[in-house]
Image (cartoon, rainbow, N blue to C red):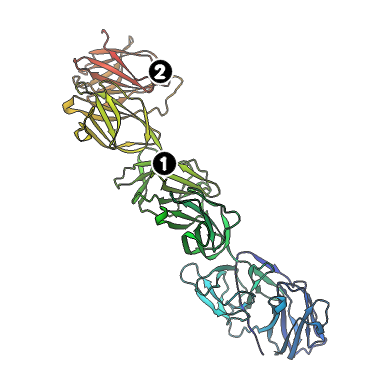
Amino acid sequence: MNVKQALVALFVSVLTLAGCGDGTMMEPPNPPAADTANVRVLHLSPDAPAVDAFANGTTKIVTNLSFPSGTDVIKAPVGSADLQVSATGKPASEKVVELKGVTLEKDKSYTVYAFGKLAALQLNALENDTKGLSTSNVRVRVVHAADGVGTVNVFQLPATGAPVPIAENLRYGTAAMPADLPSEPFTVGLDVNADRTPDLSFAVPALPKGTIVNVFAVLDASGSPFLLAQLGGSVTARLDPEQAQLRVLHLSPNAPTVKAFVDGQAPSSWGDVSFTQATPFATFSAGMHKLDVGTSASMPVLTANGLTFSGGAKYTAVAIGNVSSLKALFFENGAANLDSGKIRIRAIHAAPAVGTVDLFTLGANGMAMPLLNDVPYSGVSDPLDVPAGAYTVGVDTNNDANPELWFELPMLPGGTVANVYVTQDSTGSVFALAQLQDGPTVRIEKATSKVRVIHLSRNAPAVDVYANGTKVVTNLAYAASTATLTVPSGAYNFAVTATGAAIGTAVINANGVKLLPGKAYTVAAYADLANITARVLEDDMTGINATTDIRLNVVHVAPTVTRGDLYAVRAAGNLLLAPNIGFGDSARLADLASSSYRVGFDAEANGTIDIAFNLPVLAPGSFANVFVATDAMGEVYLLVQTMSAGTLRVNASAM
């Protein structure tokens, strides 16, 4: 038998079963029972009309067979036959293609298929031989019937490891040698440019054990490739190429607006993208692709070759770095197996001027909790599945486990997939960018804290205060407090100098001070000049009943006063507020109802009040630091520092 053989072109994820394709079998009259062969016919020409098929120019064996379908088994006489195909209703004499001298042998099985464009239609026949086939395997034969597609390589794509060749250097119009494979589902890869890397992939379902399955690579009328698997009888299964999705993000701070192109083409949904902007997801065939970024596909400023898309997956590509050193990142962004009560976060280091970093989250206890260690520039973390909610992320740039930068992420509901980029703008300012699965990017500026400074060293001159080397307070006098400053959260080195003095002469150096997001602090400089030091106090109003209560934090900064107990002085009996408070100590009192209070200090802890003060009445919801201090004349007094009204000196009152 003269058997011209044929193969594949492209593959996918949707399986559709077709019946006999409207083709009706016409068996020759009274064939000898012992002398027949089994023949099936396939119509694989995308632009040809429905057809009839004839044997030897006289006997019609198929009528009205349309693309892309096949017949059930036809019992045909053994021997040599000429086969003709004509448009439905036309006689064999008006054939559009003919295959001469097909030898049909007794009890053997054949597939006859018409393929190619109508103007160059071809007819071929294959013998379907199951000899030696294990009952647990399936025999797969790939036929390249995709007109216009050049020589291809066909691979089985395992879940891990290198592709396994099924057919190599397969030309249009030829069939590969049959391959016996397990009947389980598998993925087929098609290489169309001779680089032995699959450009398309197709998900093949479980196939019937102990059978031979012809798999034809075909183009439909629009030029889209698919596979047509010929199963039992007239049943065929269409396999379209697997598809994946890609979006592209612009994170080069000094690069101009650009376009993104995949394999030289820009999807219609992709427009221009500028810094921090991303394209929407677009759909592409699974396989190997090239990404170009620039003003045109022919003049890219960044090219990423060999991007592999797996069927059903979602991907993000990112252009990072300055325009002189652009770099492409590429990673999968799916939600597979994500619990409905969790979110999936991936961290990406895209700040070109920032070295290797450690990432932290802010725990409920206010402590920095390690999240990721040693993330280099251009590093992409594995996805982290964490309970849904709002998270504060810290970035440690100097490996001291003390984040210099904090970012407050928005509340994310369960099932959300988010990328969090640490990046920089054209001024060098570091910020975070949140990219959700199906929405715009959101720029997140550094989280902020509030801080104020109070000067409580009685014999020190007016001072200047530096934060991380920058002067932030000038000429702060004794017993004075600055206004509240809003600053980026993070780690600070504070230095205190005499006003006008160089930072190198600082009398206080407080290094590694942690200012956490959303919190307020007071930095108090206290003690006499020879022993001057600083204390960082948290001005914590969490949980206060703002309609009825006040909150006081008592701080002992009086160098002439010994350790003692603090009381609320009452006619009905004194109430101990803070026991055993010494110089440099602080004590946050239990919340008190807003009212007038007289407080007394028992310096000898013997139950006798040695000095008393009448506090001012504070409005409900107020917070105040109450400093027990000594002035330059040796007089003990209270300095009440509220959140909004500055400071108020309270002198001792008569006992």
Is residue 379 visible in the rendered structure shown here? no
On residue 438, the disc is none
* Amino acid tagged 2: Ala
| Residue 66 place in picture, x, y as percent | 75, 72
Residue position marked by numbered label 2 in the rendering: 593
Direction from residue 461 to residue 623 in the image, left or right: right
Labels in figure, total: 2
Q: Nearer the viewer, mark 1 or mark 2?
A: 1
| Residue 254 place in picture, x, y as percent | 43, 49
Q: Is residue 302 above or below residue 370?
A: below
Q: Secondary structure at mark 2?
A: strand
Q: Is residue 655 above or below residue 182?
A: above
User: Is the C terminus in the top left, top right, bottom left or bottom right quadrant?
Assistant: top left
* Amino acid tagged 1: Phe
Nearer the observer, 308 or 549: 308
- Residues under labels 1 and 2: Cα distance? 36 Å
Nearer the observer, 439 or 619: 439
Is residue 180 visible in the rendered structure shown here? yes
Residue position marked by numbered label 1 in the rendering: 407
| Residue 165 place in picture, x, y as percent | 51, 76
Residue neighbourhood size for the residue with mark 2, other residues' Cα within 10 Å, grouped as few (<14), some (14–19), many (≥20): some
Q: Secondary structure at mark 1?
A: strand
Name the residue rendered at 37%, 34% in the picture.
Answer: 487
The residue sitting at the left extreme is 530
First-in-chain label (1 vs 2): 1
Q: Is residue 73 above or below residue 335?
A: below
Quarter of the image where one finds residue 77: bottom right
Q: Is residue 412 above or below residue 185?
A: above
| Residue 104 place in picture, x, y as percent | 71, 89
